[in-house]
Image (tube, grey):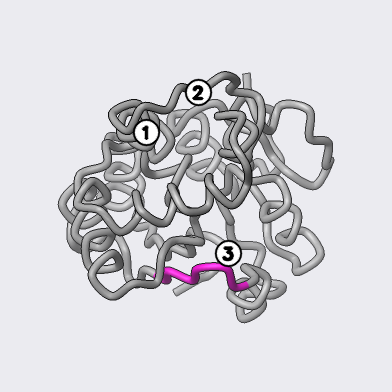
């Protein structure tokens, strides 16, 4: 396989799955109310202590909810098109809960949503550094899709093309090495034209 053209490394939450929307629904049922959308941390979004937000995230990620999180925006259509029509393979690297049953629910959710053959592997790495998981692909130029700026920034120094999915909480982040997209349609068009027009401008 030509890694540059056919392998896509990708985060899950905020890219493939609408994790935040599901968490918000769950948190509302627990009596919590989100007060802002332009911050990444749930403690800031909900104006609660960080320790409390971490507890809530763990509790949510170990609940049955994580087996049925909806796809992020137009992800289903274009992930399937990239795989079925253009031969791309996706490899997931997600800072998700490492609890055995939570991991199984995450795998089930992704496979049921996008198809069993779309992903050749799904790595739930908890609090481990994503750079350690990106290092084996150093210099390949393959895509790495993220919503969290600090993770996306790790791609460029390794010779990997970082792609940042736009969210209110990353709108002020500046890194000229990253390509920004609003949705999967934009990434689809970028990916299928990459070899003939690298760093193409997205309209």
- Count residues near mark 2 (Cα–Cα under 10 Å), then give few for <14, some for 14-19, many for 20+: some
Contact flag, marks 1 and 2 (Cβ < 8 Å): yes
Q: Nearer the viewer, residue 140 or 195?
A: 140
Contact flag, marks 1 and 3 (Cβ < 8 Å): no
Tag nearer the camera, 1 or 3:
1
Tell me: residue 91, above or below residue 110. Answer: below
Q: Answer with mark 1 or mark 3, whichever residue precedes in sequence.
A: 3
Residue at image position (69%, 39%) is: 179
Dot 1 falls on a residue whose secondary structure is: helix
Residue at image position (58%, 56%) is: 144
The residue labelled by disc 2 is: 34
The residue labelled by disc 3 is: 4
Q: Which residues are magenta?
A: 123-128
Tell me: residue 122, above or below residue 33. Answer: below
In the picture, which quadrant includes the C terminus? top right
The residue labelled by disc 1 is: 27
**Does the magenta run of residues contain 76?**
no
Tell me: residue 32, above or below residue 75. Answer: above
Q: Nearer the viewer, residue 121 or 67?
A: 67
Q: Nearer the viewer, residue 37 or 196?
A: 37
Q: Is residue 146 left or right of residue 170?
A: left
| Residue 11 locus on image (x, y percent) | 49, 54
Q: Is residue 130 left or right of residue 17?
A: right
Distance from disc 1 to disc 3, alpha carbons, whole Å, reads 40 Å
Distance from disc 1 to disc 2, alpha carbons, whole Å, reads 9 Å
- Count residues near mark 3 (Cα–Cα under 10 Å), then give few for <14, some for 14-19, many for 20+: some
The answer to whether residue 27 shows anywhere in this view is yes
């Amino acid at each position: 396989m030509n890694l540059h053209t056919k392998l896509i490394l990708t985060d899950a939450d905020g890219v493939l799955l609408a994790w935040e929307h599901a968490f918000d629904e769950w948190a509302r049922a627990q009596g919590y109310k989100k007060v802002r959308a332009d911050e990444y941390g749930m403690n800031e979004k909900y104006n609660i202590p960080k320790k409390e937000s971490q507890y809530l995230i763990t509790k949510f990620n170990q609940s049955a909810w994580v087996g049925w999180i909806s796809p992020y925006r137009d992800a289903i259509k274009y992930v399937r098109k990239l795989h079925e029509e253009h031969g791309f393979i996706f490899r997931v690297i997600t800072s998700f809960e490492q609890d055995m049953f939570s991991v199984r629910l995450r795998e089930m959710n992704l496979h049921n949503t996008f198809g069993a053959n779309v992903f050749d592997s799904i790595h739930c790495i908890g609090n481990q550094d994503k750079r350690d998981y990106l290092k084996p692909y150093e210099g390949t130029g393959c895509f790495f899709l993220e919503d969290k700026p600090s993770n996306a920034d790790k791609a460029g120094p390794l010779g990997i093309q970082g792609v940042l999915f736009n969210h209110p909480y990353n709108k002020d982040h500046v890194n000229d090495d990253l390509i920004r997209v609003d949705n999967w349609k934009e990434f689809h068009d970028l990916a299928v034209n990459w070899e003939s027009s690298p760093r193409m401008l997205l309209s």
